[in-house]
Image (tube, rainbow, N blue to C red):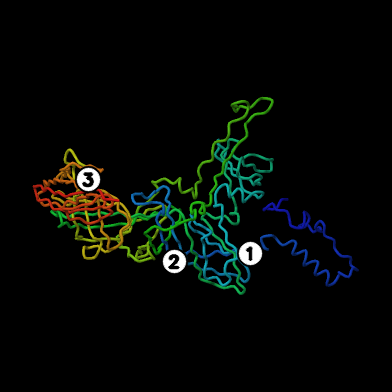
Amino acid sequence: MTTPDNLPSPAGRGWGRGLPPIGVAYPHPTSPLRGRGLLFLVAGLLALTTPAHAQQRPAVEASAPTAQAVTIYRDPNRGPGGRLDRTWPQGFAMISETRHVTLPPGESTIRFTGVAEGMIAVSAIVTGLPGGTIEQNRNADLLSPAALVDGTLGNRVRVTRTNPTTGVEAEETAIIRTRADGGLVLQTDTGFEAVRCAGLPERLSFDRIPAGLSGEPVFSIDTRDASGGSYTVTLSYLAWGFDWEASYVATLHEGGAGDDLRFDLTSWLTLLNDNNQSFEDAELLAVAGTLSVVSDFRGLAEPPQARPLALTCYPLGSTATGSPEPFYGGGYPPPPPPAPPPMMAAPMMMRDAEAIVVTGSRVLAREENLGDLKLYRVPERVTVAAQSLKQIAFLDRENVTGRLLYLAACEAGSEQDTPTAAGMLLAAVNDEDHGLGVALPTGQVAVFERGPRGEMLVAQETIRDYASGQDVELALGTSAQVFAHCTRQTTHDPATPQWSRLRATLTNANPHPATMRLSIGSPQQWQLRGIETRLKDGQRIAEVTVPANGQRMVEWDVRPTTE
């Protein structure tokens, strides 16, 4: 009778029935090997008959993480204005886990179950082991119908069939004879048959899970400990499928204008975990700045697959009566339909955005320096849930001092036939004297203004990374109250280096004065006189004040620079 695991005995077919194994000769009673030599022979036979798994390193399961830290890095290829991609995040995280493990003497394999499916295995480091690491591996298959069938190939399962007329279930044992990459064939007492091809409801029951299969991703290392013992180890690794971005809300105070503008600024860090694993009560950090990354993290972090079971039945009928299945295109049956997407650990790009869960925390993250980068540390432990967006408040400043500027360009050769609307700019200095003084990561800014009927949206913009001490400027669109009209007063011949006079006529229909910033040319192209300017972003600019409900004219001379 076939044994339950259907594996032939290591020494031969008759080993279990008292017969000598094939190819083994016993010594003659009078042979010199009869005494001590016989012991050597028996020892050798026992070594030959030892199961293969007994000669392998014993597997030791590490405990669940007792402490975790998740440091999320932004997508290094996403510049200012780029939005976080919720369906295919391109950022990554450094994950550190503290676990406990008890090792036997000698060599053993430690299994870390529940690592991130986006784990970059080549980046993994395990510390705290006395013998270090001999070899490290990551499982390629997750527990799934196909992996369960493949791991039980040649072994017994239970088949339960339901009579569609009576509803009575009948169960029998069978042996799996084919892999899960096509039709599944079983051997029963009545012969060979394909699963679910007889038209009866059928289900398979497995008595055990094949060794090495787990419903969660597993990372394993081989180690050596001469005496054995219990240890606290730390597993650190990079993982793909994370990202974060900053979002700001600036609320302008009612009645503020010109150089006396006040606003409140609130910011949130939106953190995305697209993995199927949660990190409970973790220390959470986010790193801002441009990080140089040369490795292909996406290619190095291929998640383990949970393969589906695709069942295929052969066409019914016989060669004498013909097949009832239609043939197409010259005698070949159509190919089987494609396999459905995996039910577990699906590739991250196939996840539905509807599966993303958003949570928020009002705990303010603290800013720290990390070289030339900025690190934001959440002071309380939080849970980075699987397939989720989490928002952490990291900035909440009230009564920030700023200015409302109006922008216009009046360069030589840019005469205008009609006045043009001036642009608007919210300008502030990022220092403590003006109510800020913190690093501002790139992100989206929504600007609201308080009024008699509540807060109204007036602009939405993108800001780049701003360090502490820099000038922060937010574009607010164009004005319907302030205009600029630029004209030339004298004829200018570009071939001769003579001076020409330009005039800017500025009008302001607001009930308060307006500060106009005029951009009047690059110092590398034009020489200027008759107006006070300063250099900003490679351009000469002049700031003038236009009275309330009035106008102002500004004139200056310009000529091309000489070689």
- Return the residue nearer the eye: 40 or 84: 84
Q: How many marks?
A: 3
Q: Label 3 sits on what residue type? A: Ala
Which residue lies under the disc numbered 1? 57
In primary-sequence order, the first of circles 1 and 2 is 1
Mark 1 falls on what kind of element? Answer: loop
x, y percent for residue 160: 59, 44
- Return the residue nearer the eye: 359 or 423: 423
x, y percent for residue 446: 26, 51
In primary-sequence order, the first of circles 3 and 1 is 1
Tag of residue 412: 3
Q: How far apart are marks 2 and 3 (CA)?
A: 65 Å
Residue at 10 percent of width and 47 percent of height? 551
Q: Label 2 sits on what residue type? A: Ala
Residue at 22 percent of width and 63 percent of height? 435
Mark 3 falls on what kind of element? Answer: loop
- Return the residue nearer the eye: 195 or 345: 345
Q: Are marks 3 and 1 in contact (CB under 8 Å)?
A: no
